[in-house]
Amino acid sequence: MTDQYGRQVRYLRISLTDRCNLRCRYCMPEQGVDLCAHADLLRYEEIVAIARAALDCGIDTFKLTGGEPLVRRGVPVLVAALKALPGTRQVTLTTNGLLLGDQLDALVAAGLDAVNVSLDTLDETQYHTLTRRAFAPGAVVDTVRAAARRLPVKINAVLLPETADQWLPLARLAADPGVDVRFIEQMPIGKGEADPGLAGDKVLAVLRQAWPDLAPCHEPRGNGPAHYYKSAGLTGRIGFIDAVSHRFCASCNRLRLTCTGMLRPCLCYDDGTDLRALLRGGAGPDELKKAVEQAIAAKPEGHCFGAGHGSRQTMNRIGG
Ligand code: SAM
Ligand code: SF4
């Protein structure tokens, strides 16, 4: 279905939980996280019912996210259920990678099409400071390599001033077959609001010192707003998600479903439709479809970050 600004909406990001085993500085508070009650989370059968309604409206691609989606039990079961729906084109996952190694076999068997792994630094001290947890980034890299032998993998790194020395080491991971590396501008949402962002152009200038032939590549890749560069020295691509500096809204093709069932037309605004209330109030497929159509029609033309009033919710709740 096309929205009022001519954008075809084909993609639904589904947050499975607001819980996470990390506390990334730009995403969640360090302490006192206000978690929602288990009973308030959408059940898997409710998510599948919403996905059916979305498919009826022309959405055919689902991304599972969170919080950390893999802290929720049975994700491969949900992947298989979504893949089994007639019309589903792709089901992918965004994860911090810590639990991916253990679940990789089951996820691949369930039909997962691709995975995004968030990793902002390879430096252990920086990783501990940024994530406020004592896990090893090296283990995430090992999992990325294991996953890339079976699925397309994209590494997502949020751009932060203190990890500038990591841009090159992170980009070098795109020398591995099956791995793209993408740099994301920090968005002024939730905990990201306090920090000044860094523009993707700065990274490109640094990477060009190592790969002077880095050039834009125009073939479509993935479902998102990234733009990509290629070098003869890298097997994978380098991507940029310029969420703030170059507004990506003109090509925005997505809706977001929060873990408690709010369907949101835009990341930036807090309004949405409470699909959980509809479902638990006995709504059938037609009412759900109408609600999805309304959300597509309500997509605003663009985000409001520059205006200094992003969403008040933290990213783990929205499903970044
Ligand atoms: N826990 C999973 C992960 O980290 O990939 C999935 C959820 S996380 C909210 C999804 C993505 O949002 C991650 O790539 C994370 O880096 C990104 N993110 C969180 N807060 C952000 C912010 N303020 N600006 C830009 N990206 C952000
Ligand atoms: Fe957790 Fe992902 Fe947010 Fe980091 S970015 S705190 S891993 S939900």
Image (cartoon, rainbow, N blue to C red):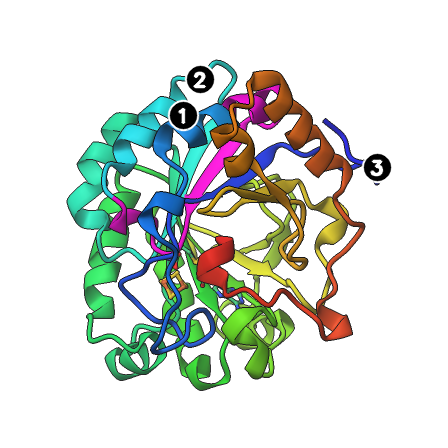
Q: Position of residue 90 (x, y in %)?
A: 46, 29
Q: Nearer the viewer, residue 70 or 141?
A: 70
Circle 1 crowding by C-alpha within 10 Å: few under 14, some 14–19, many from 20: many
Q: Position of residue 118 (x, y in %)?
A: 38, 60
Q: Position of residue 284 (x, y in %)?
A: 55, 18
Of label 1 and label 3, which has the lower sequence position?
3
Q: Are marks 1 and 2 in contact (CB under 8 Å)?
A: yes
Residue drawn at point x = 36 percent, y = 35 percent: 43
**Residue type of the residue flagged with mark 1:** Leu
Residue at the disc numbered 2: 85
Can you tell which quarter of the image residue 253 is in? top right
Residue drawn at point x = 50 percent, y = 65 percent: 314
Q: Going by the image, does 253 lie left or right of 185?
A: right
**Of helix, strand and loop, which one carries label 2?**
loop
> Between marks 1 and 2, how big is the CA–CA gap?
5 Å
Is residue 89 something one can see in this rendering? no
Circle 2 crowding by C-alpha within 10 Å: few under 14, some 14–19, many from 20: some
Question: Which residue is farthest front?
Answer: 281
**Residue type of the residue flagged with mark 2:** Leu
Q: Which residues are magenta?
A: 51-72
Q: Going by the image, does 124 lie left or right of 260?
A: left
**Residue type of the residue flagged with mark 3:** Gln
Residue at the disc numbered 3: 4
> Between marks 1 and 3, how big is the CA–CA gap?
28 Å
- The answer to whether the residue bearing label 2 lies less than 8 angstroms from the nearest atom of ligand 1 is no
Is residue 224 something one can see in this rendering? yes
Disc ID at residue 82: 1
Residue 222 colored in magenta in the image: no
Residue drawn at point x = 58 percent, y = 77 percent: 193
Q: Going by the image, does 258 lie left or right of 187?
A: left
Residue 64 colored in magenta in the image: yes
Can you tell which quarter of the image residue 186 is in? bottom right
